[in-house]
Image (spheres, grey):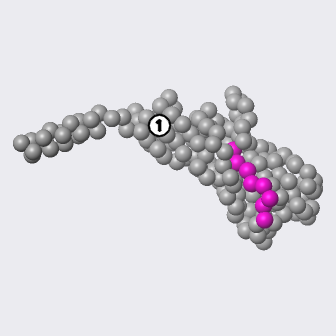
Amino acid sequence: MKNKLLIVAFLALSVSLATCDKVLTFDISDETTVTIEKALTPFSIPYDFPTPDITTNSEQEFENNDTKVELVKEIILKDLDLTITSPTDKTFSFLKSIHIYIDNDTEEETELAWKDDIQSDAKTIQLNLTTNTLDNYVKSSKYKLRTEVVTRETLNQDVDIKISMTFQVTADPF
């Protein structure tokens, strides 16, 4: 009798698990470059640097992960790293703070990530992330970033910074 109850319980659990909807979670990565120009960078005053439009490949990414735009439940920023690509010997010691915002043609600008009181001799830093939902930005065909920086020293040369972003997507399968 005990074995029959175990078998019935196992079958009931198996059926309930088989009928549950599977939720997909996967990452989408994007990157762009911003140049902090020497002549335009005021010392200790916030200054904005726009980036060119970032064309997304999100529809293809969704399809590659067995879902589609209409089935996306949530997109959040999982990681945002900055890496100095030029000059090769430069570190982030010149930077006091940075705030990065995302924008597109249909949505209002919202903050993505920031770091204040940067004390880094590294060439790569990881920013603090907001918890904003970014569905309508990443699902669109393009978006742009605005980078606001405050420097702690006057730059004598342009500094190129690669912005690498990883977005976590949660969606239903098709």
Position of 128 relative to 112 (above/below): below
Q: Is residue 103 visible?
A: yes
Q: Quadrant of residue 37?
A: bottom right
Is residue 115 found inside the magenta-colored segment of the image? Answer: yes
Q: Secondary structure at mark 1?
A: strand
Q: Residue at x 70, y 48 (%)?
A: 113
Task: Give the magenta-colored segment's residue range.
Answer: 112-119
Q: Is residue 86 visible?
A: no
Name the amino acid type tagged 1: Ala
Q: Residue at x 41, y 36 (%)?
A: 173
Q: Quadrant of the N terminus?
A: top left
Residue placed under numbered mark 1 in the picture: 171
Place of residue 16 in the rendered image (x, y in percent of width and height, measured from the top left): 27, 35
Left or right of residue 110: residue 62: left
Q: Quadrant of the C terminus?
A: top left
Q: Quadrant of residue 51?
A: top right
Position of 171 relative to 36 (above/below): above
Badge 1, how many Cα within 10 Å: few under 14, some, many 20+? many
Is residue 113 found inside the magenta-colored segment of the image? Answer: yes
